[in-house]
């Protein structure tokens, strides 16, 4: 069940566009018998594996067609396994090869595809030097039908990749005989066992108190001030405006009836607007920017029972695209004129917001809400810093298979982004080569290993802290994604991604609460004088070097010209 869970966790893949690089990416040797061609690895750790010390020899009671012995090397997170194939299995593998061969070669006296005796196939193949080829194919059959299933089902072997023979192919070919037992030794990467820098206890966990440093923009005081303005506006007290004939001013409030028409090119009333665009008993606050452009400006000075003809422009972002950006004319009748009194921000105001709240608590909550909104922009930066600190608490070897898989995904994504940004396929194809991939993997290795360690640690922390994602949350997220994706919705691909993302979010919040955060607040777009000085210094140095080269070229040209004249 643990392996099925891990395979499910590994099944979600990045969206990588399918063009010429696909065949190359799939051809990179990954040892991927049980790992799909995509990663990215975010929930890839099996917490219930029993660690085996390095190197460890596990004696296994020999049984027909089974694992004879296992040597696990934790230094490389790999195992070497010796497996016995029975006489029946070698015969079955060889017979399968003979059948396949009979379908693909023409033999005099036999119809193509008909059943041909093994000795006839062998005779034909031997004349062309291909009898060894039959044995090689039989050995490959044994790898896929005997070795791989035996390793996959053994409790002490948890492979991530395709097993590779450790014995010489020539030796195995010489030893192979159909209907006789043969032993095969293979090596394969296995899932690593997570090891913390210190063992977790109830009182002390190695992931508590992580020292996390990152940068984000400072607290937005202007946003908080606006939040207070909006809050006061919602609590404003209305009273009939005094005077014999009170007129509307900016800051007042009124109730109006509105009848709208589309404006013609000549600026006259045209077709009536839909009922949804007009209305009776409409509350209007005399503040700019709250309604259609021109509405409140056209009502300044209006008195009760006045009807104003007001020309407005609908906002471009209007949901009704038939009206967005269009000009309309409204007949607006004023029914009431009120003054608005904004409350003072004090304990009484806070208590009206929520009984029992005082002004200090109100200001604290508003500040937290405003800052939380800004902080959400930097959750990715914060989580990356936590991942980095978390990886340093892990002492384990990441097997090469996982590094290669992750590197392949990142390499493919990089090439895809290059194409999306306008790079021609002809230029991208030049980068698609085993040599370039290996260079990329070497450059990315440290970051990949760090990310894999952090991902495995997140899964283990969730287990240790008993953090689970509720099915209801997953279904809600999937429902939202289904609305957005439409016909492209693929639940099989999205479900594990959603589960993984939600789980990581929970773990990240737990680690944040327990971490020692060192946050640097930096102004966005702040002028960096030091950087500009460095760039200027580099520019001057480069110009001086270029000037010096030009002088040398001139001097050489002059010397050459003088030499030519003397000749």
Image (cartoon, rainbow, N blue to C red):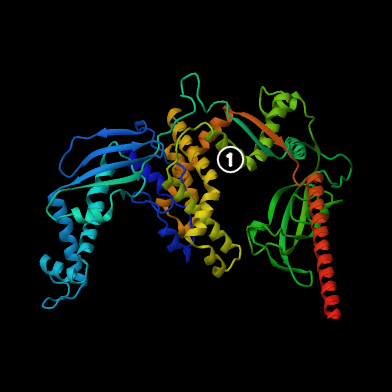
Q: In the image shown, does 85 or 510 lie closer to the viewer?
A: 85
Q: Is residue 146 above or below residue 67?
A: below
Q: Quadrant of residue 307?
A: bottom right
- The residue shown at (69%, 37%) is 370
Q: In the image shown, does 141 or 247 lie closer to the viewer?
A: 141
Q: Is residue 39 visible?
A: no
- The residue shown at (51%, 34%) is 507
Q: Residue 401: where, in percent of width, then height?
A: 41, 47
Left or right: 114, with 266 as reference point: left
Point out the image quarter for the N terminus: top left
Element type where label 1 sits in the image? helix
Q: Residue 115: where, in percent of width, then height?
A: 12, 69
Q: Residue furthest front?
A: 567
Q: Is residue 68 above or below residue 438?
A: above
Left or right: 237, with 450 as reference point: right
- The residue shown at (20%, 67%) is 101
Left or right: 356, with 463 as reference point: right
Q: Residue 207: where, in percent of width, then height?
A: 52, 28
Q: Residue 236: where, in percent of width, then height?
A: 76, 36
Which residue position is annotated with label 1? 384
Left or right: 199, with 560 as reference point: left
Q: In the image shown, does 501 or 198 lie closer to the viewer?
A: 198
Q: Is residue 319 visible?
A: yes
* Label 1 packing within 10 angstroms: few (<14), some (14-19), many (20+): some
Q: Is residue 374 above or below residue 511?
A: below
Q: Residue furthest top?
A: 203
């Amino acid at each position: 069940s643990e392996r099925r869970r891990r395979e499910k966790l590994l099944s979600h893949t990045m969206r990588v566009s399918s063009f010429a690089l696909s065949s190359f990416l799939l051809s990179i040797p990954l040892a991927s018998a049980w790992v799909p061609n995509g990663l990215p690895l975010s929930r890839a750790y099996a917490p219930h594996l029993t660690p085996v010390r390095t190197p460890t020899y596990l004696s296994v009671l020999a049984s027909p067609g089974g694992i004879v012995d296992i040597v696990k090397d934790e230094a490389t997170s790999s195992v070497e396994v010796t497996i016995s194939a029975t006489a029946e299995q070698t015969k079955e593998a060889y017979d399968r090869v003979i059948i396949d061969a009979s379908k693909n070669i023409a033999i005099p006296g036999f119809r193509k595809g008909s059943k041909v005796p093994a000795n006839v196939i062998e005779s034909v193949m031997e004349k062309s030097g291909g009898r060894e080829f039959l044995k090689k194919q039989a050995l490959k059959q044994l790898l896929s039908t005997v070795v791989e299933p035996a390793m996959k089902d053994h409790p002490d072997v948890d492979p991530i990749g395709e097993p590779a023979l450790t014995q010489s192919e020539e030796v195995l070919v010489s030893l192979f005989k159909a209907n006789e037992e043969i032993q095969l030794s293979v090596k394969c990467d296995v899932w690593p066992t997570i090891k913390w820098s210190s063992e977790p206890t109830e009182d002390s966990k190695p992931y508590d108190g992580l020292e996390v440093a990152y940068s984000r923009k400072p607290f937005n005081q202007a946003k908080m001030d606006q939040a207070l303005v909006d809050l006061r506006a919602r609590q404003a007290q209305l009273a009939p405006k005094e005077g014999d004939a009170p007129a509307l001013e900016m800051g007042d409030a009124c109730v109006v009836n509105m009848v709208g028409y589309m404006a013609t090119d000549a600026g006259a009333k045209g077709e009536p607007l839909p009922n949804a665009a007009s209305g009776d008993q409409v509350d209007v606050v005399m503040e700019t920017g709250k309604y259609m452009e021109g509405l409140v400006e056209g009502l300044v000075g209006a008195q009760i029972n006045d009807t104003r003809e007001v020309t407005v422009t609908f906002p471009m972002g209007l949901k009704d695209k038939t009206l967005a950006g269009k000009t309309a004319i409204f007949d607006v009748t004023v029914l009431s004129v009120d003054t608005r009194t904004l409350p003072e921000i004090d304990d009484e105001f806070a208590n009206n917001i929520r009984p029992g709240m005082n002004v200090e608590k109100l200001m604290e909550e508003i500040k937290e809400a405003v800052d939380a909104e800004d902080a959400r922009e930097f959750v990715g930066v914060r989580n990356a810093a936590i991942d980095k600190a978390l990886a340093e608490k892990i002492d384990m070897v990441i097997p090469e298979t996982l590094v290669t898989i992750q590197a392949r995904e990142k390499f493919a994504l990089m090439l895809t982004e290059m194409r999306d940004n306008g790079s021609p396929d002809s230029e991208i194809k030049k980068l698609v080569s085993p040599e370039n991939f290996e260079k990329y993997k070497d450059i990315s290795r440290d970051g990949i290993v760090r990310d894999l360690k952090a991902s495995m640690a997140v899964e283990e922390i969730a287990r240790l802290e008993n953090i689970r994602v509720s099915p209801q949350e997953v279904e809600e997220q999937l429902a939202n994604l289904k609305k957005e994706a439409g016909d492209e919705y693929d639940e099989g691909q999205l479900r594990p991604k959603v589960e993984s993302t939600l789980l990581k979010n929970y773990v990240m919040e737990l680690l944040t609460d327990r971490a020692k955060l060192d946050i640097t607040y930096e102004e966005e777009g702040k002028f960096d004088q030091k950087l500009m000085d460095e760039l200027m210094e580099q520019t001057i140095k480069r110009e001086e070097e270029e000037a010096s080269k030009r002088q040398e070229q001139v001097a050489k040209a002059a010397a050459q010209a003088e030499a030519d004249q003397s000749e």
